[in-house]
Amino acid sequence: MAHQMTVDQLRTVLSQTLNPSADIRRAAERQLNEASKISGHPLLVLRLVASSDAADAAVRQSAAVHFKNIVKKGWNPDSEHSDHSIVISPSDRNLIKSHLVELMCTVPPQIQAQCSESISLIAAVDFPSKWDNLLPELVQKFNSPDPSVVQGVLLTANSIIKRFRYVQRSDALYSDILYVLERLQAPLLTLFKTTGKAVEAYANDASQLKPRLAALRSTCRIFYSLNWQDLPEYFEDHMGEWMEEFAKYLQYTNPLLTDEDEETEPSPIDVLQAAIVENLNLYANKDEEPFLPFLPNFTSLVWHRLLQVSAYPKHDTLATKSIRFLSSLVGKLMHKSLFQEEATLRQIISNIVIPNLMIREVDEERFEDDPQEFVLGDMEGSDTESRRKCAQELLRAMCRQFEAETTSICSEHVSSMLAEFARDPTNKWQAKDAAVHLMLGISVRAESAAHGVSSVNDNVNIMDFFSTNILSELQQADMS
């Protein structure tokens, strides 16, 4: 019968799981599997995770991963990942839940991430009915002077309450939402505002700014989860405070956090602004009356931010979410007054739609690397988002309210881009590609994945465009 290891024995076995020798690693993993079947083993693992010996950093990380796997396989006997040989006694479960949040807040970031995942796995089973002190413990850590601790508990809270999104309403769901709101809604707003003051105070210190902007972004994701089902009364009563903060960060700039040479990785400001725009879009799609007075200002702010984004992939998420926000507004009769001026429509098409329809160098590289994935990303109905797809959706939204005007303006641009292509087909093929996509955007009124296009724009001669600009190329023997 297997016996309980000592901490030193466990440390040795975990270090062996990192050994370059496959035989040594497999033997160590077998020992860990056997040890997991013994009551008390999870607590022993946590003791090792909590040790403060810097020399044990890799072993502590390995221990944190091992603990997470024990929780994943042993906490919920009804889980598809369940391993019924793993024993976690009721007393061990209570001790783990009593100490795990505090432990998460005292360990280095990599280990903190593993502890956070473990908390989320346990919370999926026990929260809130069997873990009533979890949320108060997390909220208490909002006051920590260490921004990495605050970010850690926010990430954990977010992972716990993401389950409120994309699910059907039920009495049980609303009971859980109400439970969370009563304990989280006020501290969350307070934290958002106090973190904002810290951002102002540390304006010249990038090392202090980055974790605080990350915390603001995490707060925005929690805001999204709490508001996904319905607009809670507290958020309605304090909407002005939230919107004031959102507006501030849509205009926020800081050269310390922006790398003009970076092409792929979004900055902390970019990811925060993308999360804010997603919150705005959530409210806009719900047509919440208390949000309506804020719409003109946010329409202007998102519009101007969209005009500033680069064509680099680092801005793809911010660009697509911003375009979707404008699409959700322009396609609704109730917001028609915001966009009805012809000059406004021309600016949207010239400065937002067409630049985001253009093929970029990175798109060419993606097409060369994986043509099928690139085409899938451009297709309507695919799960992936692209700037081009979102720009076409914006056009269709414009056509729902301003079909004649949008068609006329786009037709001018199509003629201009086709003329540009005709003058230099070898080097200006991108202009024709954009013209084709612009034409597609204004031509299709309705379509479905099952039946394709079911309604078209009567103001567009689709067959003439196809015969003149597409058919001749399809008939060429040399398609290179």
Image (cartoon, rainbow, N blue to C red):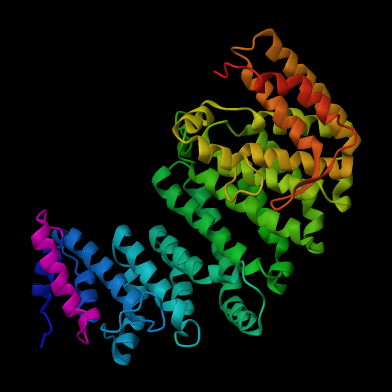
Question: Is residue 431 shown left or right of residue 146?
Answer: right
Q: Position of residue 212 (x, y in %)?
A: 47, 53
Residue at screen point 31% across, 71% down: 68
Residue closest to the far bottom: 90
The answer to whether residue 55 is seen in the rendering is yes
38 part of magenta stretch: yes
Give the dominant element type of the magenta stretch: helix, strand or loop: helix
374 part of magenta stretch: no
Residue 460, quarter of the rendered image: top right
Residue closest to the far top: 423
Quarter containing the N terminus: bottom left
In the image, which residues are magenta? 18-42
Q: Position of residue 228 (x, y in %)?
A: 65, 66
Q: Position of residue 146 (x, y in %)?
A: 38, 60
Viewer-closest of 164 and 466? 466
Q: Position of residue 440 (x, y in %)?
A: 75, 34
Residue at screen point 53% across, 44% down: 269
Question: Is residue 324 shown left or right of residue 315?
Answer: right
Viewer-closest of 397 and 192? 397
